Amino acid sequence: MGAVASTVRTRASRRLPAYPDEGRRKVGGAPLTFLLSLLAAAVIAMVALRLLGIDGDHVMVVLLAGTPYAAGGGALLVLFAMLVRRWAVAVVALAFTVCLFAAVAPRAFTAPRPLGVGPAVRLLSLDLAQGRADAATVVALIRAQHIDVVAFQELTPQSVAALAAAGLAAELPNQIFQPGDGPTGSGIASRYPLAPVQIETPTTFPQATAQVSLPQNRAIQVQSVHVRPPTDDNTTDTWKRELDALPDIVDGAPPMVLAGDYNATIDHAGLRAQMISGFVDAASQAGQGLLPTWPTGGRLPPLLPIDHVLVDKRCPVDTFAAFDVPGTDHRAVLAQFVATVNG
C-alpha cells in the first residue's frame, strides 16, 4: 500500500506544461529571435516610409523602389516565424506586411474601366539607351504591334539615322525629333499628324511634346518623359523637382499622355502625385503594374517598373504590355487606351 501511495505522489509531483510549447527548446534560441525581430523592424520601417509619402534622400528612394519585394519578404518572414514558433514576431510582421500588400497588390488586378467611346490609340514608349537599341527590332515591333504613336527617350543622331534606314517612316511618317548626344535626345513619331507643343519648364533632358490629331476629330497631347535618375543626393533633388514639374491635366485641353522613363516606381510619392493630378498609370489599370521594365540585358531579369504610360483618367485603358529590345537596358512599354474627350 505504501508503494502505491509513493507512486501516486511521484506522478503528482510532475508538473505538466501549461502550454504545448512550454518545456521545448525553441529552434535557434535567443539569437534567432533577435534576428527575426530585426527583420520585423525592417518591415515596420518600410511601412513607415511608404505611409509618410516622403521620398527622402537617395537611400530612401532606393528602399522605396523595393516595396513590392519588402511585401514578399514580409510574407516569408511571417511564415518562417510561425514555423519556428516566434508567435509575437509573426503577429507583428503579419500586421505590417498586410499594410505593404494593401499598397502593392491593387496594381496586379485590372481596375474598373470607365465607359468611353472614341478612337483606340496604341502608344509605345522606349528608352533607346543612348541610341544603342537595335533599330531593326524597334521598327519590327512597331509594325507587328500596329503602333500609332511612339515616345522615344535617349534619341541620338545615330539612332535617328538607324531608325530611318530600318523603315520607321513607312510605319510612322510624322515625326518630331530632338536628337542629342548621350541621354539628352527625345522624340515622338506617329502615323497621325503632329503639331509641336512648347514646354516652359526646363528639365535636365529635353522632353519632346506634340499634339496628335486622331480620327473622329479627336486629339491627344503626348509628352516623351525622361526624368533624371536619382543616383546621389544632389541628383535626387533634381529628380524630385522634375517629377513635380510634370504637367497637370488642363480642363478644355486635349487628353494628355505622359510616356517615358521616369526612373521612379508607383511607390515613390513624386510619381503618385501625378495620380492625384488627374492621371492613371496604364500598367496598373490593366493589372500589370508590377511588371518590371528595368534593367534588361543582364544576367538577372528586370527588377523595377520605372517606365510608365500615364494617361488622362478620362481615357479608358484597355491593355498594357512590355517587350524586350536588344541593345537597351529598358523594356519597351505599350499601352492601348481610348481617346474619349476633345479639347
Image (cartoon, rainbow, N blue to C red):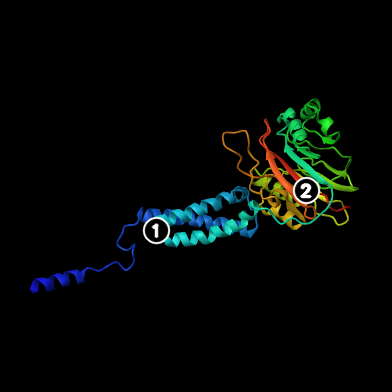
Q: From the viewer's perspective, is residue 98 above or below residue 131?
A: below
Residue 155 in picture, x, y percent from top left: 77, 34
Q: Quadrant of the N terminus?
A: bottom left
Q: Which residue is mark 2?
A: 337
Question: Is residue 186 rendered to the left or right of residue 287?
Answer: right
Toward the viewer: 197 or 114? 114
- Residue at 44% across, 62% down: 88
- Amino acid type, callout 1: Arg
Mark 2, secondary structure of its residue: strand
Q: Does label 2 or label 1 sit earlier along the sequence?
A: 1
Count residues near mark 2 (Cα–Cα under 10 Å), then give few for <14, some for 14-19, many for 20+: many
In the figure, residue 82 lies in which quadrant? bottom left
Q: Which residue is mark 1?
A: 85
Tag of residue 163:
none
Residue 289 in picture, x, y percent from top left: 66, 49
Residue 57 in picture, x, y percent from top left: 63, 50
Mark 1, secondary structure of its residue: loop
Toward the viewer: 239 or 216? 216
Q: Are marks 2 and 1 in contact (CB under 8 Å)?
A: no
Count residues near mark 1 (Cα–Cα under 10 Å), then give few for <14, some for 14-19, many for 20+: some
- Amino acid type, callout 2: Phe
